[in-house]
Image (cartoon, rainbow, N blue to C red):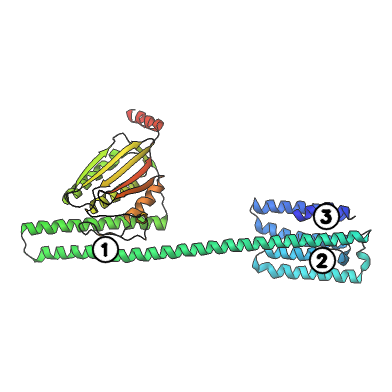
Amino acid sequence: MLALAYNVPLNYMVGLPWVAVVSALVGALFATLYYLSRVKRKTMLAMLIFCIAGDLMFIAVFFLNSGINGPTDIFFILTMVMMVAIVPVSQYWVWVITNVIIVSGLHYLQYSFPELVPNAYHEEVNRYVDITSAYFTVVAVALFSFYLIRRNYESERKSAEQKTAMMRLLNEEKNKLFSIISHDLRAPLSNIQNYLELLTVVDISEDERFKINSDLLQSTRSTLDLLNNVLSWSKSQMQGLSFKLSPYNVYQLLSSPMLLFIRIAESKNIRLEISIDPKLEVVANGDMLQLVIRNLINNAIKFTAPGGRIIFSAQRHDDLCHFMVKDSGTGKPVKLSTDIFYLNSDSTAGTSNEKGVGLGLVLCKEFTEAQNGRIWFESDSVSGSSFFVQLPLVSEEEVVRMETLFTQ
């Protein structure tokens, strides 16, 4: 379009008004084709019309602009370059051969019937200006076309390399996850089997039976937590995160799970202190929020030494709900890295040799951010670690509306 727009005044200047008119008409047609391709997305139709119109235009220009003595042959080369740049590969040779046949036929026609192609230049200088200008126009448009082709090629190549690297990383993470799962699932299930065989075969005392039952319960609980995390992660990877955010009262949502966590902590001689503002209304997905809090508290229990303390709180901070899980640590110096939120981090056994695959915190980060929240931690080598989750609160207007509906 730019090349044709440039040629309209130029052809008037060199005494070729009809060529200028044809250039203007075809330029308007190409503008229409651009709209048809880019806006209406009828790309194949636009390309077909472009190829046909380009050939027809330069056939007309050949007769109007001195034939082989003018710049039309150069424009036919440009037409072929642009066709090759945009048409599907399967159509390359169709349009190249068509171009060659048209140019050869026009040359033969002018040679056989020279009176059909009169000299359109009134002065020789106009011919030199026109051909020189055509050369620079064709070079500029050809270089621009090749630039676009190279740029798109480089963009596609980089995109393909990035996707390949991402697929390789995901494949490595998947292989590592499955390797860890196969090991960490086999161990607790083997322990459960051994415990059950022992209970059915050997005559043991009540104290020993109680100890075995406690170990059996712990192995079963750890295995179930592992399976729940693996299933949640697998679903999010295969199906994507599909969920709905709704208003939830934090106290009502988490009070029942907290009773279970208190018993689990007591079995390890750990004191779990809970502080939840009963008026907190958070915008979240109930299942995802429970999974996040469950994993954080399970991790705190896992890495807190017997006799230690864990604090869980949920409080208002401006227009955000601020969850905190703070533990007193293992009694040994520990320094956490931000890699704990990613699958490539190494899993560490708990103070009672609890196993895991390092998937819990990965899910916490993924599910928190999916709920428009933020998760982070603070670690102290002496006093343990504190994990924080922030989620948006329900607006004051929405709380009033919900209370009104509840009253009614």
Q: In terms of sequence position, does the residue under pointer 2 or pointer 3 come before the other?
A: 3
- Up the image or down, 175 lies above or below 280; here it is below
For mark 3, what is the residue?
22
- Within-10-Å neighbours for mark 1: few <14, some 14–19, many 20+: some
Q: Position of residue 53 (x, y in %)?
A: 76, 59
Cα gap from disc 2 to disc 3, whole angstroms: 17 Å
For mark 2, what is the residue?
73
For mark 1, what is the residue?
185
Foreground of the two, 83 or 340: 340
Q: In terms of sequence position, does the residue under pointer 3 or pointer 1 come before the other?
A: 3
Foreground of the two, 386 or 102: 386
User: In the image, is 340 to the left or to the right of 48?
Assistant: left
Residue that appears at 73% across and 59% down: 50
Q: Is residue 124 visible?
A: yes
Q: Is residue 86 visible?
A: no
Amino acid on which the number 3 mark rests in the picture: Val
Residue that appears at 19% across and 64% down: 191
- Within-10-Å neighbours for mark 2: few <14, some 14–19, many 20+: some
Residue 239 occupies quadrant: bottom left
**Quarter of the figure with the N terminus:** bottom right
Cα gap from disc 2 to disc 1, whole angstroms: 75 Å
